[in-house]
Amino acid sequence: MSVNIVEHLRRVEVFGGLTDEETLQIASLCRVQKMGANQAVFNEGDDGDELIIIMEGCVRVSLITRSSQGTMTPNTINMLYGGQSFGEMVLLGGATRSATVTCVDPCVFLVIKEREFASLCDKNPRIGYKVMRNMASDLSYKLRSSNLLLRGNIRWQAGELGRRSS
C-alpha cells in the first residue's frame, strides 16, 4: 500500500477520526486516476457510484443554468483543491450527480467505488459510522451555506421586483 495514499486520506475531512488501521482499510479501496486540464470528471445528472479525492490539481464545480433566451451557461459554485473530496452523496445510497466537475489543472485523484465502501462498512460498521458522521457534518455546513446564498438571492429578487412595480 502506498504511504502516499494513506497520507492523503489522513488530510481528507470525511475520513477524520479514523485509526491508522481503518485508514489502511480505506486506502485498500482506492485507485489512482489521472485527468488532464479542462476534462470533465462528470456532468450534472450523470449516474454516480464513486467518491473522488483530489491528490493534486484543482477542479471547478458548476451548475448549468438556462437563460431566458435558452442559452445553457455553466455557473461556478465552488473550486476544490488537493485534499478535498467530492461525490460524497453516492456513499449515502447512490445518486445522480448534482453538479458538473471539471479539471482546471491536470489532476490526480483517489477514487473509491460506493459498493466497495459499503462492503467495507458491512464488515466494519465503526468505519461507516465515523465517515457518515463526518459527511453529515460537512453536508450540514454546505446546506447552511446554500441557505444563506438562497436567502440573499430571494432578498435580491424581492428588491428587484419591488423596484419594477414602483
Image (cartoon, rainbow, N blue to C red):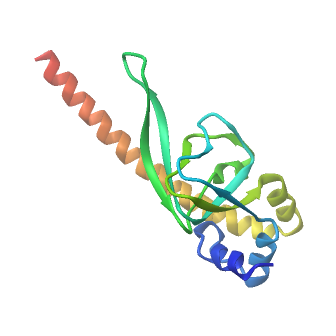
Above/below status of 128 relative to 18: above
Q: How many marks?
A: 0
Position of 95 with respect to 137 (left or right) is right
Quadrant of residue 153 in the image? top left
Which percent across, then down, holds residue 158? 24, 28
Above/below status of 123 relative to 35: below
Quadrant of residue 7 in the image? bottom right
Which percent across, then down, holds residue 31? 77, 63
Quadrant of residue 163 in the image? top left
Above/below status of 53 relative to 87: below
The residue at 42%/44% (across/down) is: 76
Position of 160 with respect to 110 (left or right) is left
Which percent across, then down, holds residue 138? 54, 60
Position of 56 with respect to 34 (left or right) is left
User: Where is the C terminus found, in terms of image quarters?
Assistant: top left
- Work out whether residue 18 or residue 1 is closer to the camera in this orientation and state it: 1
Which percent across, then down, holds residue 79? 45, 55
Position of 46 with respect to 39 (left or right) is right
The residue at 81%/78% (across/down) is: 1
The residue at 67%/59% (across/down) is: 34
The residue at 61%/65% (across/down) is: 134
